[in-house]
Image (cartoon, grey):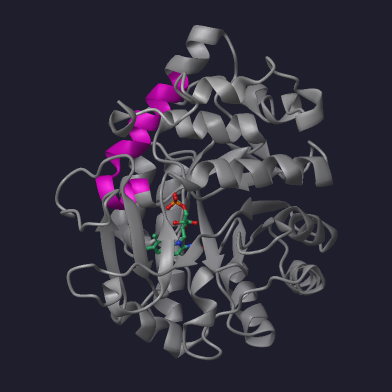
Amino acid sequence: MTDTPGLNIDIGGIRLKNPLICGSGEHLIETTGVEAALKAGAAAVVMKSTNESEAAKVQLANAEYALLDSDWRPLDWNESPPRDAHLFCRSGLSPLAFDDWLALLKETDGVARHHNALVIASLIPADQVTGLDYARAMVAAGARVIELNIGAPHAAEAAAGAITLERDAGRVREMTERFRAAVTVPLWVKLTGQSDDVAGLVAAAREGGADAVTIMGRFMGFVPDVETQAPILGTFGAFGGAWALPLTCRWLALARRAVGPDFPLMATNGARDGLDVIRFLLAGARGVQMTTAVMTAGFGVVDQSLQTLRDYLATRGENAADLIGKAADRLASYSESPAEQDQWRGLFAEDGLSKGPSNT
Ligand SMILES: Cc1cc2nc3c(=O)[nH]c(=O)nc-3n(C[C@H](O)[C@H](O)[C@H](O)COP(=O)(O)O)c2cc1C
């Protein structure tokens, strides 16, 4: 497929042919998945993350996944999920031995070059010291970008020492500095959403030398099953869905205010289709990572989303880069947004009670 002019985006010294990135997940563990993502038109593919911990690999073998509808009932994996499906799961890291993982990186990077795209090496370090050696080995194997995920939601539940989760700005800065000093290629840092100051963490990563920041990791949840009265999956798990988009958008906008419009932000958590990609761009993202939508509905989602983006831009005579932060920069405070007086009265029936059959 030829690249469409007007879709390209610059992220910290890297030019992407479009803003759509396939975010890391189980569908990107093997060559076939990475190649399918590249073939579908993704500008970049973040490989399934690896690290130095055996426990993190074992965790993948014990991973469980539930796709739930809006009534919390299980959906069939083999059917195309509704837009509001929730994915509740506990996942692990790539099962591949590190040498095999590096071989996969080399092989798929060759394919990516053919598609004018990138394969991104993803590391969720278990430890600050050995993790640095892994990052160096990735660069030696030809990684053109490393995404350092220090915000994986499962850290509190995974085996001790399997993965790190940094919520403190000082630690985020320090971790970023260490990895920045260890590698020569662009460093993207993926951060948690489980913080009351995600924008502060973004600022800390930038100070530590990150070239771009990806926000934000999923939240941990717990879903009781009313039939069995047991927890679905038996444990806490990471929880995601289309509902997360407004939360991610808000932190994108706040991060944009904190670090300025020139620092590259990337969105993850909530994109389900091409209009969501556009929403994330308008909120301030330069790149949009899609994971669950692709993992549950297939790689056709990439192609369809790009078509939606192309059509949207063509209709408006805009380029993808024109959209970045456009809505975020129009946000007003509550006091700056006077609406028609007493709108709340219109929410109720004439007798002042809530509307609906019980009032009739
Ligand atoms: C099953 C599953 C496995 C994941 N594995 C990884 C991983 O190995 N590394 C990583 O950085 N993120 C991983 N993620 C997080 C996703 O890349 C993404 O940030 C998250 O799912 C939110 O985006 P979404 O709404 O597009 O799914 C995983 C997500 C899911 C659902």
Q: Is residue 309 magenta?
A: yes
Residue 85 x/y as whole percent: 31, 48
Residue at image coords 44%, 82%:
56
296 sits to left or right of 320:
left
Q: Is residue 128 left or right of residue 225?
A: right
Picture coordinates of residue 350, whole percent (x, y) = 47, 18
In the image, is 204 to the left or to the right of 76? right
| Residue nearest the observer in this picture, 228 or 19 | 228
Q: Quadrant of residue 123?
A: bottom right
Say above or below: 274 vs 206.
Answer: above
The quadrant in which the N terminus is found is top left
Q: What residue is rendered at 60% in x and 19% in y? A: 319
**Where is residue 199 drawn, in percent x and y?**
75, 53
From this viewpoint, is residue 233 visible? yes
Q: Position of residue 217 (x, y in %)?
A: 55, 60
Is residue 63 placed above or below 285 in the rendered structure? below
Numbered range of the magenta stretch: 293-310
Q: Nearer the viewer, residue 327 or 25?
A: 327
